[in-house]
Amino acid sequence: MSAGMTLTRLLAAFLFILVTSSPIPAAEPRDEALWQRALALHRSAIVVDGHNDITGAMTDDGYDLATPSAGKHHTDLPRLREGGVSALFFAIYVDNKFVTNNAATRRALAVIDATHRQIERHPNDLVLCKTAAEIRAAKQSGRIAALLGAENGAAIEDSLATLRTFYRLGMRYLTLTHMQATTWADASTAPPQHDGLTDFGKSVVREMNRLGMMVDVSHVADKTMSDVLDLTTAPIIASHSSARALSPHPRNIPDDLLKRIATNGGVVMVNFYPGYIDPRTAIILEQLQPEIDAIRKQWRDNPARSKAERRKLMESKLPVTPLSVVIDHIEHIIKVAGIDHVGLGSDFDGISIVPADLRDVSMFPNVTYELLKRGHSETDVRQILGENFLRVFTEVERRATAKAEQVSGGAGSKGP
């Protein structure tokens, strides 16, 4: 499928309303005894969300996480508490517009700063965590572990020195690309430019291994992912990706690479975005893309453009994706890669349409309930919720070279 159907952020402001306007399929009556068992398990487990984009609102709108925001955002502190979220990766996302303006690193620093300020503002609720052990300690203290993960390798602006600086600021994973290729790695939703990783891209992976920073292969092209798996000496993650066998979107991971990630010891954290996981929605969005592009061309910077786009999207009548589709992706990854290699990476606040019963961060217990309902053991559910990720994080730390910092590539940049 073409990259044009990926409307994840481009349409975020306009699709959100569709969630509340579309009819929800009738749900089966809940088994109350099983629900109480699920809640008890969920509250005692470490629940890790591998990717959350509320950082955009925190950075650009001055949004405070303590402010209830149902109907506007997917994420706030009251609903994180309600959803039993133990650890949250705040996405340090760098849009391509900052890349083209040579402001990628500056943007990343602004988002890091906004995240640090939220943690400082709410010390009773959030604590910055840089290790797997600190996540466990946060759980014991009753606080939510706040972690940083950079989305878009362009954020380092071809500088290993910048990569190391991000690590010192708390960055514990780097998503190598976003929707477009970087100067050193190909993306899944854009024409290839490098046949995977360039030599500098390989040096980035090596340096991440040395530092103990997780390599995130969400968004990357299949060849890039294969190159990473050929090279890395530590387990990798896909912080918010799903199974291509169930939905043939390039953002999802094919079975052959799922198997290689299992051999590598990594973890794939399932994305909740219907445009990726539900083929019905993906087809409609792909068909809709030319009309949206035409509206943008017609109205350009005219404020009326947003109304025209919203009207077109409302007319599209996107189907509501049931929670069962998310569970299907989890189970497929278990079938192909094994129970040790799957987790959760919602993409909340970076996506605009969401599955039924997974409308925001408060609804994570529904995942636990559905997994138990399908017969998964409590041990397996704990692994999916967070233990698989913690194992990978611990192993990445363990394998990191314990030597004094070394400068790779001369001055630590792509150039001489």
Image (spheres, helix red, strand yellow):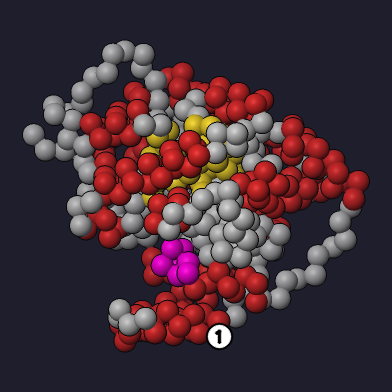
Q: Label 1, on which residue?
A: 315
Q: Residue furthest top?
A: 403
Pick whichever, 242 or 393, lies toward us. Answer: 393
Q: Residue furthest left?
A: 416
Q: Residue at x 75, y 71 (%)?
A: 25
Residue 189's quadrant in the figure?
bottom left
Residue 252 point in image, percent of width and height: 49, 54
Residue 208 point in image, percent of width and height: 34, 30
Residue 225's quadrant in the figure?
top left
Pick whichever, 126 or 28, lies toward us. Answer: 126
Q: Relative to residue 82, is residue 297 depicted above or below? A: below
Pick whichever, 163 or 6, lies toward us. Answer: 163
| Number of marks present in the image shown | 1
Q: Was residue 11 drawn as part of the magenta stretch in this picture?
A: yes
- In this view of the protein, can residue 238 be seen by the observer? no
Residue 210 point in image, percent of width and height: 34, 23
SS under mark 1: helix
Q: Relative to residue 410, is residue 338 depicted above or below? A: below
Residue 2's quadrant in the figure?
bottom left
* Dominant SS in magenta: loop
Q: Relative to residue 16, is residue 409 depicted above or below? A: above
Q: Amino acid at mark 1?
A: Glu
Q: Residue at x 73, y 71 (%)?
A: 24
Q: Which residues are magenta?
A: 6-13
Quadrant for the C terminus in the image: top left
Q: Residue at x 50, y 85 (%)?
A: 311
Q: Was residue 204 drawn as part of the magenta stretch in this picture?
A: no
- In this view of the protein, can residue 169 be seen by the observer? yes
Quadrant for the N terminus in the image: bottom left
